[in-house]
Amino acid sequence: MTCLQAALDAGADAVYLGLDHFNLRRMATRNFTLGTLPEASRRCRERNVRLYLTLNCVVYEGELAALAEMVAAAQPYIDAAIVSDWAVIALCQQHQIPFHVSTQMAVSNSAAARCLMNAGARRIVLARECTLDEVHAIRAAVPVGIEAFVHGAMCVGVSGRCLLSHHAYGRSSNRGDCLQPCRREYRIQAVDDEAAEFVVGSGYILSPRDLCSLPFLDELVAAGIDACKIEGRNRSPEYVHAVVSAYREALNALRDGRLDAALKEALVTRCRSVFNREFCVGHYFGRPTSGDFTKGEGNRATSLKGYVGLVRNYYKQAGIAEIEVQDASFRVGDTLLVLGETTGLVKFTVPEIRREQEHLQEAPRDRINTVTVPLAARVRIGDKVYRQQPNPDAA
């Protein structure tokens, strides 16, 4: 719910989410459920934002009854379903739910797009393997909504249909359980010669860089896409807010004729501040080369967050937040993030710190560990507070 609120506050036109089954986010620690879906729907409809339910995993025979029950229960709260299985398409038709074709169906040509349009698809999320020219050609040939991935993790498999995690751990990416063995460093050793050993890590040949389309977003829009899809599976609220706000600002600037090279670079820098594996252009300008794979393992964000503590009170009229410092201390001038399911994300620079009548330069973690700071944006009791700091390991 915190990520949802962050997306709404950052200017999303639509959000997509998964429940606790039948989507590729099953490893998320706090997925939505049928119990929390009405609240998610209420928040979206208050902002005139569309809500899409992802129903895009492989569905087995013994799950059809549970799938039918979920689709029927979700129908009043969603604007469309994102699908990859004909059984889900049939249920959407039965319950008159608009459906969008997931990238899991790997639609990469106009004939496939037309077939799915004739079956009732309102929109098709094209395969990530499509080039910019192919996106343009499909758009010109078929009068169906076209959605393209613009930002986020790329998969070494075909549109994510990879069995590496399934073979290694019995955890299938097609069921939302991928453990991402592709992102690791490997040691290769000859069976008959222990001295013949190689470490495959410097190029991370199975781990692509993340897609970032901001430098050529105007070309994607000119190709005729109807929607920009941001991939953010299991990402933090600050990731959601930073990336969504960057693309919102870029699209607004493009509409107004203000999207120049300087603004593009500034927005890319914003996206680098949150989780990334370095950036590439995906397949839009041709097939990937060795330069499109990561040079290291893990996060290349330029900033990290450290846990500070909790909001213990918020005085609305005075615009003051009371913070209990439980872990990391913070100083005047530091950037803090406040995260909560109702609050979403509030980011601010600390102008002043007080403990009762005493002015402090630093809010320490000690025996008396509650301080107050001025904060105009409303936060809630129990919200978590983090300090943002540079990542020394960033590329």
Image: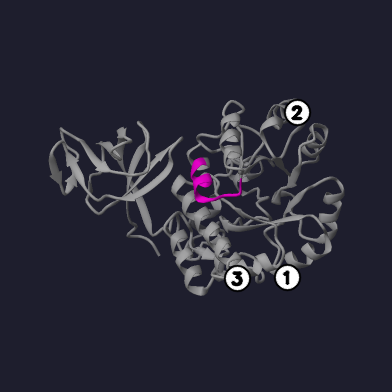
Does residue 279 appear to the left or right of 14 in the view shown? left
The residue carrying mark 2 is 68
Left or right: 156 as drawn, with respect to 244: right
Please state which amino acid type lies under the numbered disc 2. Answer: Ala
Place of residue 156 in the rendered image (x, y in percent of width and height, measured from the top left)? 62, 57
Report the residue marked by disc 3: 289
Looking at the image, residue 127 sits to the left or right of residue 369; the answer is: right
Label 2 Cα neighbours within 10 Å, binned few <14 / some 14-19 / many ≥20: some
Of badges 3 and 1, nearer the viewer stands 1
Of 331 and 205, the residue lying toward us: 331
Q: In the rendered image of this protein, does residue 321 appear above or below residue 351?
A: above
Q: Is residue 16 visible?
A: yes
Span shown in magenta: 5-14
Instruction: Report the coloring of the rendering.
Output: one colour
Q: Which residue is mark 1?
A: 133
Q: Main secondary structure of the magenta part?
A: helix
Mark 3: amino acid: Thr
Q: Find residue 111 and report its horizontal and vertical position in percent.
A: 85, 58
Which image quarter holds the C terminus?
Answer: bottom left
Q: Is residue 193 left or right of residue 88?
A: left
The quadrant holding residue 222 is bottom right
**Residues under labels 3 and 2: Cα distance?**
43 Å
Of tags 3 and 2, which is closer to the observer? 2
Tell me how far mark 3 sits from mark 1, CA to CA. 18 Å
Which secondary structure lies at badge 1?
helix
Q: Is residue 12 magenta?
A: yes
- For marks 3 and 2, the one nearer the N-term is 2
Q: Amino acid at mark 1?
A: Asp
- Sequence-wise first label, 3 or 1: 1
